[in-house]
């Protein structure tokens, strides 16, 4: 057997500095790692992996990924594939069965499939000549940019009235505001420590765009830039400076795209710049100011389009603070309810991680016509109302693929073994339907259909994050509202690219994500003709 890290084709060579840094956030291949391939550490985040095992597996088996993608199940429907049912443990003893409370039973029945009649995909047909700017302005139109111009000029005026005039300041124009955004967005393509590197003479300098605006003018706009210049007397929310923009962005998402039936609630990868993490010392990393908010999304699992954003501020150590949010499942339920407030009555299937999964939340969602499939953790999940016998590991040794199931109404609680016990709660898939987890070594492990569905959809989202998280804007302001703003702009650009790839314009130009970003920057800076095409 070849030693790990040995020779081989170019794809097996050591990762570059950027790739090595990003591997710290390497997404789990759900159907491999979270279900036992990475060893004993199965209690971590089901969406991402930072273990050495998953990193080495990713680097040593890159050439197998394409073949694995062809074999991995994509969106399994309500009808599972056939196959032998694994030998599970024998029936519970009568006294243990009688001790179970809450209506849970081992008698399984078929749950009818969920019918989804809504069409999914873009709601608007874009012309063949549509530019990157056209897709971006589906979410950030000119009227939003004009409001930024007005609010920035208002803030600059009041600021100077209070702290003294600034003779170098001239009111910003719409053209300058677009250029300002273009410079910021360029940091998502050419990752640099500071946006001001564009005007430097160093490695990250960019003379092709530096001549559009002087550095001093850019810094003046950055100093006074605002979405909402002043707090109204009736505003008490900590996001008042960014909330109108978030509302406008959400309206753009809702009007431009209809998600598929299957969606995922999670936190996208928006952590520190990977180059900074790879090169900084531990002391610098500790000193790095932590984010004061948590950003959650509801994401279409078939396209990666982010349908809804929810921002939770760390406004102190109270019950609604971020520290409490990380430790109290009921607060995660509040996040889930906020993300799904516009999803009622459509038979959506929502996949969740352990922090959100709970019986009470799933039952509440079911009354609203929202169905769920979530991974359970005795440590992270709210296990209220679940039978204790299903939360404890059996004393007898288990074989890979063995599982136990109990039902309560349409709700199924699954305990499945694969080098560790994994528990799932679902009301979206029938417990009598069989699925299979396909391994890299051409090995198939039987499982209930809900487990296969969870693996397939979460794998897609992890791959999306792994690909698109590197295109988040690198600028790291100190003000929380500005951090939220630039993250939201990054999500809007990723969504714009997804719509571009689903349009006829993609078949004409076929831009990659990096090329799409470069085109958008040039169009914002006025270096490309962006005459209206729709």
Image (cartoon, helix red, strand yellow):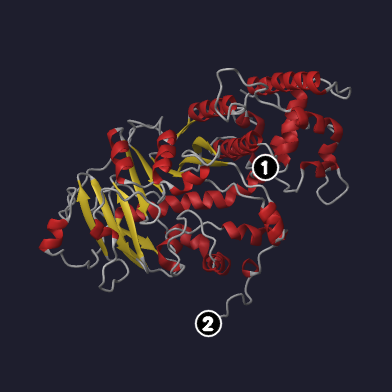
Q: Residue at x 64, y 76 (%)?
A: 7
Viewer-side residue, 206 vs 122: 206
The image shows residue 110 at horizontal and vertical percentages of 19, 48
Q: Residue at x 62, y 27 (%)?
A: 241
Are dots 2 and 1 in contact, CB under 8 Å?
A: no
Q: Is residue 457 above or below residue 172?
A: below
The image shows residue 272 at horizontal and vertical percentages of 64, 50
The image shows residue 208 at horizontal and vertical percentages of 83, 40
Dot 1 falls on a residue whose secondary structure is: loop
Pointer 2 local density, CA inside 10 Å: few below 14, some 14–19, many at least 20: few
Give the distance between the C-alpha atoms of the residues marked 2 and 1, in whole angstroms.
43 Å
Q: Which of the two labelled residues, at mark 2 and mark 1, occupies the earlier sequence position?
A: 2
Q: Is residue 272 visible?
A: yes
Does residue 185 appear to the left or right of 218 in the view shown?
A: left
Q: Is residue 401 above or below residue 349?
A: below
Viewer-side residue, 318 vs 336: 318
The image shows residue 534 at horizontal and vertical percentages of 61, 22
Q: Is residue 139 visible?
A: no
Residue where numbered disc 1 is placed: 473
Query: Which label was assigned to residue 1?
Result: 2
């Amino acid at each position: 057997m070849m030693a790990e890290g040995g020779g081989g084709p170019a794809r097996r060579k050591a990762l570059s500095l950027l790739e090595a840094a990003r591997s710290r956030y390497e997404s789990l291949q759900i159907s491999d790692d979270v279900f036992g391939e990475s060893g004993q550490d199965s209690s971590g985040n089901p969406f991402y992996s930072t273990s050495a095992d998953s990193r080495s597996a990713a680097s040593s088996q890159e050439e197998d990924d394409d073949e694995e993608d062809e074999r991995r199940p994509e969106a399994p429907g309500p009808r599972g594939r056939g196959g032998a049912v694994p030998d599970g443990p024998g029936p519970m003893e009568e006294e243990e069965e009688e001790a179970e409370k809450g209506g849970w039973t081992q008698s399984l029945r078929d749950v009818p499939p969920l019918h989804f009649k809504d069409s999914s995909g873009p709601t608007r047909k874009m012309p063949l000549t549509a530019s990157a700017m056209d897709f971006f302005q589906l979410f950030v139109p000119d009227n939003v940019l004009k409001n930024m111009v007005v609010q920035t000029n208002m803030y600059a005026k009041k600021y100077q009235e209070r702290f003294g005039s600034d003779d170098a300041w001239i009111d910003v124009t719409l053209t300058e505001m677009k250029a300002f955004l273009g410079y910021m967005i360029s940091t998502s393509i050419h990752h640099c420590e500071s946006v001001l590197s564009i005007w430097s003479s160093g490695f990250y300098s960019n003379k092709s765009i530096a001549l559009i605006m002087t550095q001093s003018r850019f810094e003046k706009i950055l100093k006074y830039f605002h979405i909402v210049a002043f707090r109204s007397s009736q505003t008490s929310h900590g996001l008042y400076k960014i909330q109108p923009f978030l509302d406008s962005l959400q309206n753009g998402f809702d009007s431009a795209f209809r998600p598929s039936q299957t969606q995922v609630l999670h936190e996208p990868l928006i952590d520190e710049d990977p180059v900074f993490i790879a090169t900084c010392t531990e002391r610098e990393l500790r000193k790095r100011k932590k984010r004061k908010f948590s950003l959650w999304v509801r994401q279409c699992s078939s396209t990666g389009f982010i349908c809804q954003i929810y921002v939770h501020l760390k406004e102190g150590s109270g019950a609604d603070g971020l520290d409490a949010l990380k430790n109290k499942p009921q607060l995660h339920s509040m996040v889930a309810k906020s993300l799904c407030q516009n999803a009622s009555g459509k038979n959506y299937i929502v996949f969740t991680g352990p922090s959100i999964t709970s019986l009470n939340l799933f039952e509440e969602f079911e009354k609203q016509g929202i169905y769920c499939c979530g991974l359970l953790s005795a440590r992270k999940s709210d296990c209220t109302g679940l039978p204790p016998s299903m939360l404890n590991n059996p004393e007898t040794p288990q074989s890979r693929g063995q599982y136990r199931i109990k039902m309560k109404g349409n709700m199924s609680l699954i305990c499945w073994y694969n080098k560790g016990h994994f528990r799932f709660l679902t009301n979206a898939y029938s417990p009598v339907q069989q699925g299979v987890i396909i391994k890299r070594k051409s090995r198939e492990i039987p499982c209930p259909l809900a487990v296969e569905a969870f693996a397939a959809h979460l794998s897609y989202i992890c791959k999306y994050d792994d690909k698109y998280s590197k295109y988040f804007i690198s600028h790291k302001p100190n003000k929380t509202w500005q951090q939220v703003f630039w993250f939201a702009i990054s999500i809007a650009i990723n969504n714009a690219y997804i719509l571009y790839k689903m349009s006829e314009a993609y078949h004409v130009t076929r831009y990659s994500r990096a090329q799409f970003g470069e085109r958008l920057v040039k169009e914002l800076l006025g270096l490309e003709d962006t005459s209206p095409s729709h």
